[in-house]
Amino acid sequence: MSPRHNRPRDAGKPADRPEAGSGRGFERTETWRGEQWIVRIIAGGPPGKFYRCPGCDQEIPPGVGHLVAWPEYGGVEDRRHWHSACWNAKDRRTTRVQRSRNAPRY
């Protein structure tokens, strides 16, 4: 009698998953403002590294899940770290109003 197989035989093959230990999250391509953007989900950033979200102008602390987006034909300097909610709401936001650091948020 042969042992029972609890999972499909091709379960060990990496289909849409990143390589183990690559440090990269899942990537997808989205269209925004008539341009193709590559969006990568990050589980948490490197320890001690803060990023500033361009959607809300707030810091993303280390270890907080977020995403990185850049134009398809852009370089490393075009990457921006966004809160996931800010990226999802980017089309509903009005033009950016730059506030000073001490301005009230209403």
Image (cartoon, rainbow, N blue to C red):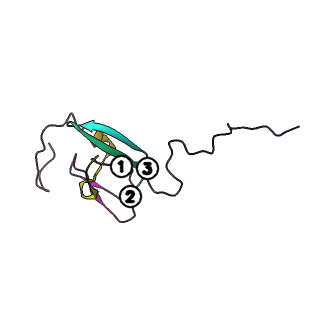
Amino acid under label 2? Gly
Give amino acid for label 3.
Gly
Residue farthest front in this picture: 73
Residue placed under numbered mark 3 in the picture: 25
Does the magenta stretch mainly form a helix, a strand or a loop? loop
Q: Residue drawn at (16%, 46%), measured in percent from left and top?
A: 105
Give the distance between the C-alpha atoms of the residues marked 3 and 1, in whole angstroms: 10 Å
Crowd around label 3: few <14 · some 14–19 · many ≥20 (10 Å): some
**73 lies above or below 23:** above
Q: Residues within 10 Å of mark 1 (few under 14, many from 20)?
A: many
Q: Which residue is label 1 attached to? A: 66
- Can residue 65 be found in the magenta stretch? yes
Residue drawn at point x = 54 percent, y = 54 percent: 20
Element type where label 2 sits in the image: loop
Query: Dot 1 lies on which element?
Result: strand
Do labels 3 and 1 touch, CB within 8 Å? no
Residue drawn at the location 30% of the way across and 61% of the way down: 50
What x and y, as percent, mark residue 93?
Answer: 18, 37
Which tag, 2 or 3, sits closer to the chain's start? 3
Reply above or below: 21 against 32.
below
Is residue 54 found inside the magenta-colored segment of the image?
Answer: yes
Q: In the image, what residue occupies the spot 36% across and 49% down? A: 66
Mark 3 or mark 1, which has the lower sequence index?
A: 3
Q: Which residue is mark 2?
A: 45
Mark linked to residue 36: none
Q: Secondary structure at mark 3?
A: loop
Q: Report the side of 62 relative to 31 (left or right).
A: right
Of marks 3 and 1, the one in the foreground: 3
Magenta stretch in the rendered image: 45-69
Q: Position of residue 73 (x, y in %)?
A: 26, 48
Query: Which sits in the foreground, 84 or 25?
Result: 25
Residues at circles 1 and 2 in contact by the CB criterion of under 8 Å = yes
